[in-house]
């Protein structure tokens, strides 16, 4: 039976045996045939053609050459020993060199024999050479070239035990010889036809042993499509299920909102703000529980949108909460919203870790009785003793700091009928990623900044120009502006970071009068932080020296210069967030990125991107290209992003098509009950039963 076949333990495979099986178990978590066949290569080496030694050039990534190993010679002794050899193919000669496994190679390489070698050519005094080339005796299999060599992820331990990509490819070959006929199709015929996909078994075969470039391409396309299709299908299904399962409170009366619009709204809302408010109101009137993601670049005005939505809830006898990731942010939301709430006679309080027990109890009581309408807070809101009379709307600000589990906890704060959830994020998530991460949320986007904002000017300066930068800062302060100077804070080297911060503070103190400067960092007590923050907000100080605690959300419209020290140590989205702290008032704002002269290629790209554009989505895309989706948004724990073969940075188009396809199917057949969808249903159930198991493939 099929299932039994892929369950076969890996030691039974030809070419594996007990000791290698143990290695595969511990190093790669490969236990059975199914695990191995799903261990896909992450790239391929082009062995389709042979190069001539005379054609090699500097900067070539790799070359495959067929020729004769004239001789090898060991030079030096002990751990300093190295092996050199001379290799010729008729067009020229080159030197080969090895610094590792010297005695093994000395014993095994055969002088005078013909080899196919592969490696990265280098040049020394104009002559070609190759270090640690792969050596394979010429044989009927490799003499014609014409194949793609799969490259598998390996660990040091595997390499030390001579399990390299070739060895794994051989295991795959042995396995596929038997497995090919056991691989079942996992997509229905109509989809295979419609999207012109190759059969599952051929895709799996060619992903390990590509018969040609064209086959490799088709194999990847097929497997990526399938992976993304089922990923989207599950997310969309979840979303539909929830629609059906969870009803939501119906908020109809908008009198309070109208009152606010008429009397207190301090500015005209942007069209984008109006649009998203309409979308959110629709949800909150629909009778179904809302789960919506509100995306809007920094400074796009999400807070006021959230407040207006809270008013809708409150006008309908419900309560609302807003949860922020830090004390400072919670404080700021509280300060900002309290002004409006007071005008409207709506009760509002703040609940964070630093709130004293007595005050806490008062708040708890207010929430339970329903007297308290809006609560602004941090994680403290999640605690079990925070109970509401009737929680109607939860706003989660800066979602990327919160996990999916926390969202669920908020749901439970209203046992009778789940509250509506509005998740707000300024981290511009590329569309591809948003679909995968938040495929179960509806999305609203504020794609417009309030009028009258001047684009921030961003420049890059080397540390050696610091005095010029100080001069510029002085000029801006003279014009009445305020300035942030931000230092990196990376946990592993916390001590060092604080040293940078202190040194920076000192040199600033020499250049500016001491009473100009505030300092805020993570090691300070919350009260001291607030005190310093407040002095800056009140314009008592002109410069705010800070670590990244300032990163999210903080809003001081008069601050118009952001100096980022050691900018090379920040990620792109972080830089973008930081820059978003300025450009909030009417004045021309500036962002100055300070770096060392020596920069890696990626760092240069990051800095250049920041200088070139202020478009958060463009920045997010570059970020995704540079980092890959793994690190983005800290949401790995959601598990949604655990993809075997698709690459969110590159496969946006396949994802789009897969999502479209999944949507179409579910719109027609909610529960996948139609006969033509039988295979899909089965596969979905399989996937659920065996999350990360071989069932995905068999
Ligand atoms: P973010 O989306 O980054 O959270 P905020 O909600 O903090 O942005 O808003 C940034 C600033 O823009 C605030 O000072 C806010 O009062 C202001 N603002 C919001 N909407 C508008 C608007 N329509 N017109 C003018 N200013 C606005
Ligand atoms: Mg905000």
Image (cartoon, grey):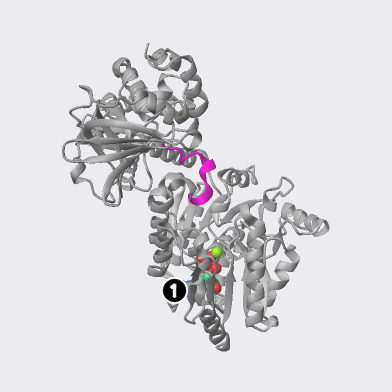
On the rendered structure, is 659 left or right of 477?
left
The percent coordinates of residue 187 (x first, y second) are 30, 28
Residue 319 visible in the snapshot:
no
Q: Is residue 685 above or below residue 331?
A: above
Give the residue furthest to the bottom: 478
Give the residue furthest to the front: 76
Q: Residue at x 57, y 88 (%)?
A: 478
Task: Respond yes or no on whether mark 1 lies under 8 Å from ligand 1.
Answer: no
Q: Is residue 419 above or below residue 173?
A: below
Q: Which residues are magenta?
A: 632-643
Residue 645 lies in the magenta stretch: no
On the rendered structure, is 96 left or right of 565?
left
Quadrant position of the C terminus in the picture: top left
| Pick the front one: 471 or 99 | 99
| Pick the front one: 176 or 164 | 164
How many marks do you count on the picture? 1
Quadrant position of the N terminus in the picture: top left
Q: Residue at x 24, y 49 (%)?
A: 57
Residue 641 lies in the magenta stretch: yes
The percent coordinates of residue 528 (x first, y second) are 74, 68
Q: Is residue 579 above or below residue 430?
A: below
The residue wearing badge 1 is 459
């Amino acid at each position: 039976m099929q299932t039994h076949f892929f369950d076969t333990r890996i030691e039974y495979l030809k070419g594996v045996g007990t000791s290698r099986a143990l290695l595969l178990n511990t190093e790669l978590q490969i236990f059975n045939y199914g695990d191995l066949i799903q261990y896909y290569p992450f790239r391929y080496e082009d062995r389709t053609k042979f190069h001539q030694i005379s054609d090699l050039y500097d900067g070539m990534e790799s070359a495959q050459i067929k020729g004769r190993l004239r001789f090898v010679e060991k030079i030096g002794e002990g751990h300093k020993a190295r092996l050199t050899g001379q290799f010729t193919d008729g067009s020229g000669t080159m030197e080969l060199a090895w610094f590792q496994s010297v005695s093994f190679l000395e014993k095994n390489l055969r002088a005078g024999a013909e080899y196919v070698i592969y490696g990265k050519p280098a040049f020394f005094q104009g002559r070609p050479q190759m270090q640690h080339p792969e050596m394979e005796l010429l044989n009927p299999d490799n003499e014609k070239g014409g194949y793609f060599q799969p490259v598998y992820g390996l660990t040091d331990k595997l390499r030390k035990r001579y399990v390299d990509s070739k060895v794994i490819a051989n295991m795959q070959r042995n396995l596929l010889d038997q497995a090919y006929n056991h691989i079942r199709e996992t997509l229905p015929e109509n989809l295979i036809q419609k999207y012109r996909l190759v059969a599952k078994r051929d895709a799996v075969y060619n992903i390990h042993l590509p018969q040609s470039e064209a086959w490799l391409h088709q194999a990847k396309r097929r497997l990526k499509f399938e992976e993304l299709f089922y990923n989207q299908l599950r997310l969309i299904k979840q979303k539909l299920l929830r629609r059906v399962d969870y009803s939501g409170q119906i908020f109809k009366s908008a009198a309070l909102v109208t009152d606010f619009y008429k009397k207190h709204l301090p500015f005209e809302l942007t069209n984008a703000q109006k649009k998203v408010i309409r979308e959110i109101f629709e949800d909150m009137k629909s009778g179904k529980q809302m789960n919506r993601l509100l995306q809007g670049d920094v400074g796009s005005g999400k807070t006021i949108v959230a407040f207006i939505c809270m008013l809708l809830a409150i006008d309908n006898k419900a309560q609302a909460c807003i949860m922020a990731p830090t004390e400072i942010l919670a404080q700021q939301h509280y300060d900002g919203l309290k002004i409006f709430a007071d005008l409207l006679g709506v009760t509002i309080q703040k609940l964070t870790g630093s709130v004293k027990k007595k005050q806490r109890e008062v708040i708890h009581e207010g929430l339970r009785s329903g007297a308290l309408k809006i609560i602004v807070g941090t994680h403290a809101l999640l605690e079990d003793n925070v109970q509401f009379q009737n929680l109607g709307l939860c706003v989660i600000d800066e979602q990327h700091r919160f996990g999916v589990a926390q969202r669920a906890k908020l749901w439970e704060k209203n046992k009778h009928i789940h509250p509506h959830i509005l998740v707000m994020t300024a981290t511009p998530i590329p569309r591809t990623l948003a679909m995968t991460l938040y495929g179960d949320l509806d999305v609203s986007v504020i794609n417009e900044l309030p009028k009258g904002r001047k684009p921030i000017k961003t420049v890059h300066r080397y540390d050696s120009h610091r005095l010029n930068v100080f001069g510029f800062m002085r000029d801006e302060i003279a014009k009445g502006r305020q300035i942030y100077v931000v230092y990196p804070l990376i946990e592993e080297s916390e001590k060092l970071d604080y040293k940078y911060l202190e040194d920076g503070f000192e040199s600033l103190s020499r250049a500016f009068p001491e009473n100009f400067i505030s300092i805020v960092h993570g090691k300070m007590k919350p009260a001291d932080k607030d005190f310093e923050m407040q002095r800056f907000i009140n314009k008592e100080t002109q410069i705010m020296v800070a670590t990244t605690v300032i990163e999210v959300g903080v809003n001081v419209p008069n601050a118009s210069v952001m100096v980022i020290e050691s900018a090379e140590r920040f990620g792109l989205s972080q830089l973008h967030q930081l820059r978003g702290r300025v450009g909030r008032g009417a004045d021309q704002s500036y962002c100055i990125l300070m770096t060392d002269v020596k920069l890696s290629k990626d760092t240069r790209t990051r800095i250049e991107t920041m200088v070139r554009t202020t478009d958060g989505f463009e920045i997010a895309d570059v970020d995704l290209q540079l980092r890959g989706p793994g690190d983005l948004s800290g949401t790995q724990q959601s598990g949604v992003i655990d993809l075997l073969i698709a690459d969110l940075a590159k496969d946006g188009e396949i994802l789009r098509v897969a999502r479209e396809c999944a949507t179409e199917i579910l719109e027609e057949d909610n529960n996948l009950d139609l006969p033509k969808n039988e295979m899909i249903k089965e596969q979905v159930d399989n996937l659920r039963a065996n999350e990360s198991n071989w069932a995905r493939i068999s």
